[in-house]
Amino acid sequence: MKKLIIQIPCFNEAETLGIALAALPRQVSGFDRVEWLIIDDGCTDGTVDVALAHGVDHLVRLSGHQGLAKGFLAGIDACLAAGADVIVNTDADNQYCADDIPALVGPVLEGKADIVIGARPIEQIDHFSPIKKALQRLGSAVVRMASNTDVRDAPSGFRAISREAAMRLHVFGNYTYTIETIIQAGQKGMRILSVPIRTNGDLRPSRLVKSIPRYVVRSVSTIARIFVTYRPLRLFLPLAIVIFLAGMGLGLRYLYFLAIGQGAGHIQSVILAAALLGTGTFIFLIGVLADLISTNRKLLEQIDWKLRQVQEVVRVGTRPAEPQVVIDQRGLSKRLEARSPAGAKARRKS
């Protein structure tokens, strides 16, 4: 039985969640079951009540507001625990057109992609300012270069993820998952495709982009952190070479003046050359150390992936019928009693 789970991270979304849920499909071609999962990221309004009133199948509750990235990852873990074959992530503000979910999951079902990202018609979105549209284009271009992919809309949260890809994803930051997961997946050689999708009218201002400068700084820091994590030498080595060559150039300049008998007036060049040579060497050593740490991290991620594959074998062999999943603030999954004949028999005995 092939299962699709549509997950929605939520933080005080009572006003818009009902609209988003009402638009979600209960049947999608290629799947025997379509289920909905809501991540309660410390909501203090009636978000949970709205979710339950609309018949969500799974509820993930975090203790306190932990941010979009942590909520996304908790939802991924819960979807895997609930037996999802494909996971679709969307937003609670009904920004993305739910009718495009079949187009989103199509390449995953056909085996053409591990992750599919919905590309919004940025130029046609009226509530996006010209500055925001330009930053979206620039940011997506940078992410394409960093990830070696052809993603057209990197900040888009409307995406389909295969079970295998979901088991390999890790999110380190607290701010957002969109850019980080693309670069990480690209560095791991996953197949990422973009498909055009439609958007709905604006129901509320973006909570992620409250300030353009702050959003740019956080996005740049996310890209830099991913590079340091997975390709540290690509970041440190060019910088070390530039600084080292500058120091060597000053050193050769001083030797020239020394050879013609004018070295006494260029002692400052010697000091600066020594500082630059030392700094370049130091940065190179930091890069080598970071590369060793990165290699160790990749090995740990491979071990984590292998463990998940072993758990997958166990899950397939002993999978209970339709469990609901709750995740606490430590990310530990707890399965509620399954609605299965064995569960019912156990309840009768008690």
Image (cartoon, rainbow, N blue to C red):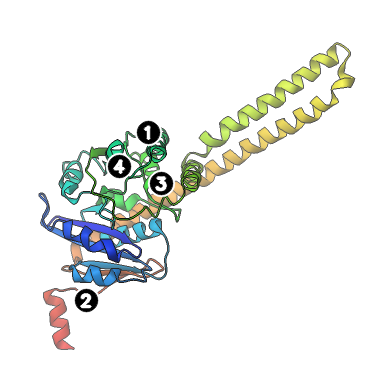
Identify the image quadrant of residue 262: top right
Q: Which residue is mark 1?
A: 148
- Among the two numbered marks 4 and 1 on one chain, the one whose residue lies closer to the N terminus: 4
- Among the two numbered marks 4 and 2 on one chain, the one whose residue lies closer to the N terminus: 4
**Residue depicted at 42% across the width and 63% down the height:** 66
Q: Amino acid at mark 1?
A: Asn
Q: Which residue is mark 4?
A: 126
Identify the image quadrant of residue 65: bottom left
Q: Which residue is mark 3?
A: 180
Q: Residue furthest bottom?
A: 350
Query: In front here: 280 or 60?
Result: 60
Residue 328, relative to residue 226: is it above or below? below
Identify the image quadrant of residue 78: bottom left
Q: From the viewer's perspective, is the residue at label 3 or at label 2 nearer?
A: 3
Q: Which residue is mark 2?
A: 337
- Among the two numbered marks 3 and 2 on one chain, the one whose residue lies closer to the N terminus: 3
* Direction from residue 293 to residue 315 in the image, left or right: left
**Residue depicted at 30% across the width and 52% down the height:** 166
Q: Residues within 10 Å of mark 4 (few under 14, many from 20)?
A: few
Q: Residues within 10 Å of mark 1 (few under 14, many from 20)?
A: some
**Residue depicted at 47% across the width and 43% down the height:** 216
Q: From the viewer's perspective, is the residue at label 2 or at label 1 nearer?
A: 1
Mark 1 and mark 3: Cα distance apart in space = 13 Å
Q: Amino acid at mark 2?
A: Glu
- Verify CB contact (< 8 Å) between mark 1 and mark 3: no
Mark 4 and mark 1: Cα distance apart in space = 30 Å
Mark 4 and mark 2: Cα distance apart in space = 47 Å
Mark 2 and mark 1: Cα distance apart in space = 44 Å
What SS does tag 4 mark? loop
Q: Position of residue 214 (x, y in %)?
A: 50, 48
Disc number placed over residue 229 in the picture, else none: none
